[in-house]
Amino acid sequence: MAGRIPDQFIDELLARTDITDVVASRISLKKTGQNYSALCPFHNEKSPSFSLNPNKQFYYCFGCGAGGNAISFVMEHDHLDFVEAIEILAKDAGMEVPREQGAPDRYEQNAELLNRLSECATYFQRQLIEHPHKEKAKSYLAKDRGLSGQIAKVYGLGFAPPGWDNVLKAVGKRAELQEQLLHGGMLIEKKENAGQYYDRFRDRIMFPIRDTRGRVIAFGGRAFGDEKPKYLNSPETPVFHKNLELYGLYEAKQNTTTLDHILVVEGYMDVIVLAQHGVTNSVATLGTSINSQHFKKLFKLVDKVTLCFDGDKAGRAAAIRGLEATLPVIQDGKQVRFLFLPDGEDPDSLIRKIGKDAFLELLDDSSSLAHVLFDHARSLVTLGDEEGEAQFTQHAMSLIQNIPKESTLRSLLVKQLADQSGLSSETLTANAPTPKPLYNPTQHAAHQTPHAPEYDSYGYDDTYVPHDYDDQPLPHTYPDERSHSYKDGHKSPSSNFKEKNKWQKKGKWQNNESQPIFTPLQAGLTRVAQATLCLLMHPAIARDIDVPDPLLSGDTIDRQAFSRVWRYFNKHPENNTGHLLYQERNSELLDAIYRLLNHPDATTKQKITNAKQEVLDMIEEQTQALGLNSSIQRLKTHGNDAINNSETKQELRALMEQLRKKKS
């Protein structure tokens, strides 16, 4: 049974894994001194800014801020989750991944349910070649929708034949199997007869919905004619939550060579037809408007997301809901654009009509987030005078207020609004209205739709003959705190972007990150930071160094970083910096450590032979300083009356003078 991967195993795996081999097997490296350089695989660039340090077993990109160890590189480059990356590296190292016994995760608890859903998918696929009504389904797919056998294989399409008990008889022959199918949304219990069931999906083209591991977790069924509903989707189940998933995301990850841009469309068929024409990076929401959770998921994978909508009134309304969903979670280096199609067209019909190249040109000419935001704010204004301009400014600022305060995009939008309104940025910010209430898609779901689809190696051959599934349970992802914190603790690769600004006379503007997470420091390091860098460059010295307790606490990031680094290497002197990067879960401390590792002084500290003495000197200096400061604080806490005492006042002056001399 799967369980949590032991920490000791992950430490051992990192010790056995050479990050140079891992990265070199995926991108081209060039030796530059003691390190390696390369074109960064996480953003487009013409000159190398990706650096790999084989001694410390970590990588870092000066262009986009991506950084980490072998595990994080495989996760980001191969688009895998934490456990998948561990399994890949363990296989390469000839190691078997152990599991600790403990509480089973969500997927372990529902392993049998997932098996039944997989069996249902296989059953539906077989009906395309076995059922007497198969020609009806094949004709619809091939003639009416123009789909090839190959694309149907990729997306695992199937056929639910007419009848009330086909799945029930094929997959639910026993009572316990029927119970599992009921919980998986495949059966419906008869109201008048408890314990008796009938098939939910009947006489429909079936779209399996897969999770990010490729496991079938739900289905969408499309009617052949004008039956209602046109699309029938699985209900919410223990393994399927439609507001968290996107159809086609797994296929996009698997079939797109460099996935740096995702196109969000409205329907299953849009995704499939686009893929058949070579646009493999599209996904669809599952019966709901796109929400902030969707954007968070997408921003972990790509830097650019384009929302595609019809050009009619309904499409414009959907675009505004998409705008409102992205504002609270937009990040520097991430780009959201909006593509409005001609009236009467959807991605399916349009790409058939104009072809891939023309469709991609439309994508390139899509509208920026800034354009849509300001355009929407103006559409709410009915007056053409100063009062109308004031209303426009208020509407725009109420939207901008929802963007995170630290975002460079927020500052740029305020500046653009200042140019348009004639008011200063300071005035706009000082008089900003309450943020506009944002759209909540969970309150306006159009209809239920399944999870994000993802396919496994189903497949029909070219004549729609599917292979059987393996009877063994699929591997499970363990969603423990460690795996989540690891992924969240490391920043997703980001890159600067340019887009047309239709509201400023300057034409184009650059959205540079205000302070990239891992930007090299230019200023000199403090003594504490220098000592921390010595420990990072020479971890083994930590076991021979004692640090007084007062020095292991403090409210400055320098002191906290030193404390964390010393504690770790004092306990694990055999580990390297790559292990520490993996273990660290505090993003602020992690950023501080990366800045130190990429400081120009790092090379110098790596070569010195007296690193231990430098750390000891810092400890002695800080201990004395802390002693002085604690004495001063003790005197101050006595209150004004005590300090007015001549002896106390004289002692305080003496201590302050000693401290001044220390600092000078």
Image (cartoon, rainbow, N blue to C red):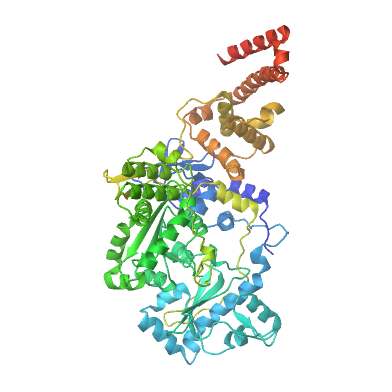
- Name the spot of residue 391 as percent of width and height, x first: 38, 49
Snapshot quadrant of residue 647: top right
Image quarter hosting the N terminus: bottom right
Q: Is residue 517 left or right of residue 164?
A: left
| Quadrant that contains the C terminus | top right
Vertical side of 651 occupied by 516: above or below: below
- Seen from the viewer's position, the closer of residues 127 and 506 is 506
- Camera-side residue: 326 or 15? 326
Q: Is residue 504 above or below residue 222?
A: above
Decide which of 592, 456 is in the foreground and name it: 592
Position of 422 compared to 233: left or right? left
Q: Position of residue 512 (x, y in %)?
A: 39, 42
Q: Quadrant of residue 226?
A: bottom left
Query: Residue 615 placed where, x, y %?
Result: 61, 25
Q: How many marks?
A: 0
**Residue 626 x, y percent position in the rendering:** 67, 21
> In this view of the protein, can residue 180 be seen by the observer?
yes
